[in-house]
Image (spheres, rainbow, N blue to C red):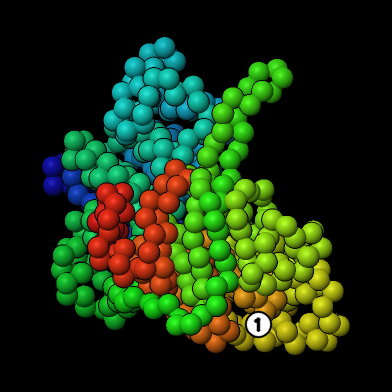
Amino acid sequence: MADVATLSINNLSIGFRQGEQVRQVVHEVNFAINQGETLALVGESGSGKSVTAMSVLRLLAEPPAQYLSGDILLDGESVLSAKQSQLRKWRGNKVGVIFQEPMMSLNPLHTIERQLSETLAIHQGLSLKQSRPVILDWLNKVGIRNAESRMTDYPHQFSGGEKQRIMIAMALINTPKLLIADEPTTALDVTVQAQILQLIKKLKAEMNMAVLFISHDLAVVRQVADKVAVMEHGHIVEQGDSEQVFTNPQHPYTVKLINAEPPDRFCSTPENADLLVKADKLKVWFPIERGLLRRVVGHVKAVDQIDFEIKQGSALGVVGESGSGKTTLSKALLRLIESEGGLSFAGKDLNKLSKADLVSLRRDMQFVFQDPYGSLSPRMLVSEIIGEGLEINNLGDAQWRELQIIEAMQAVELDPDIRHRYPHEFSGGQRQRIALARALVMKPKFIILDEPTSSLDRTVQFQVLQLLKRLQHEFNLTYLFISHDLKVVKALCDQVLVMRAGKVVECGSCERVFNAPEQDYTKQLIATAF
């Protein structure tokens, strides 16, 4: 048994039944992972990575999923021939899984202690009392601060990074031989991402565990993987040692993925440009109320005395960890939440405008959200989504609006003929282009982009960045770009504002801040990102 791989996938083909037909999505896949080894499965969305990984524990619904050929072996035992009772023993015991979105994986109605104790009760027969020291030990191992006092907290009381740590504890609490980590760091800040990757590497070494790591981020893969398997359209097109794949890739698709990094250059501020946005000691404090009479006992200082200026045609990048106040700042700029201090747009004091004047001015100020899946109504056609702002503002007649919709779609490189389809028929990159068209159709001067590329593959991300630069030059657009990816900020923005706990840590030109950061926090962010 010593020579048997922990996980071995042999000639695996998977399809999904659609009516009378079966659509094959995984084609004769082969790879193996030994104990103490990490294999990264990489590729763009839709390449078959997650389908392959979920098949290891038969987590795909059967039907419509069908295993067309091959086998999956765990310590030499067939998964595809195993009974459901055997699969239940393996799930969470022999194999742990960290899912991509921790908030969707944790039950919002139960405490962390209860959720972790459940897996110990199922696999080890431990009572809640017996589970407590084990749970506490694991919460400390994964770096949850004040773990003992936080065991009775609910998922919404933890940050994104903490929730991901809890998911790691849940996956490893029964000391599995194999860990499947499906995009475990995609939505996390660079500092938290680095901590999570370090934690997975540390626990893998301590437990001599095999790891199947799924990601589209090659920078992350290079940090954690011993071996790499590259998937395209359901096929493994290249695999080998991590160093060999990165330094001497053989397949054109692997070369394309490696080269799809944001351009390593600085942007310059337009000369003699007019001032468009100015914040002077901007402040957004949320009251903390306690007791029966709801007395204010303190404040959450989400944005605290912030100053900055943005010139027409330029881009300001706002960076910082989760909870630093980035999104609150963007909402204050649009007057979606109340703020104190000076705030002006195109020379107009936003805090003194009437509601009617503000509605009119907002045509010049648009927002593109982080999640291209959640920000588009699934019940509306693409043409209705893009043209909604025109209709709400009573601009033009139906024929004129249709022409504006077509023009906006062409600007973001979408075929106008697809405007009568629904959002679910498009990829993540196409949906983000639809969101951009929705903003552009209003002919704005200023667009706030809140993490618009974080959930996209590197190749699609690269295309969206190129598109944003082209649109900026064509329409003289001004951006406020919120991101945790400093490489993207460096490629798109000419100024950067670093936030932490509601305050500005550092601000200046990207060239100055990236080449000669003054503050320790900025130095830490840049060192982690690059």
SS of the residue under disc 1: helix
**Residue 211 horizontal side relative to residue 460, left or right:** left
Identify the residue at horizontal 25%, vertical 63% (top origin): 516
In which quadrant is the N terminus drawn? top left
Between 87 and 261, the one lying in front of the other is: 261
The outermost residue toward the left is: 2
Q: Which residue, given by chain and number where applicable, does mark 1 sit on?
A: 408
Tell me the quarter of the picture where residue 205 sits.
Answer: top left
Is any atom of residue 207 visible in this view? yes
Is any atom of residue 122 visible in this view? no
Image location (x, y in percent) of residue 438: 66, 73
Total numbered labels placed on residues in the image: 1
450 relative to 111, above or below:
below
Identify the residue at horizontal 73%, vertical 57% (top origin): 352
Tell me the quarter of the picture where residue 418 sits.
Answer: bottom right
Image location (x, y in percent) of residue 510: 35, 68
Identify the residue at horizontal 34%, vertical 40% (top origin): 95
Image location (x, y in percent) of residue 259: 30, 76
Tell me the quarter of the picture where residue 407 sits.
Answer: bottom right
Identify the residue at horizontal 35%, vertical 46% (top origin): 192
**Residue 397 horizontal side relative to residue 359, left or right:** right
In which quadrant is the C terminus drawn? bottom left
398 relative to 183, above or below:
below
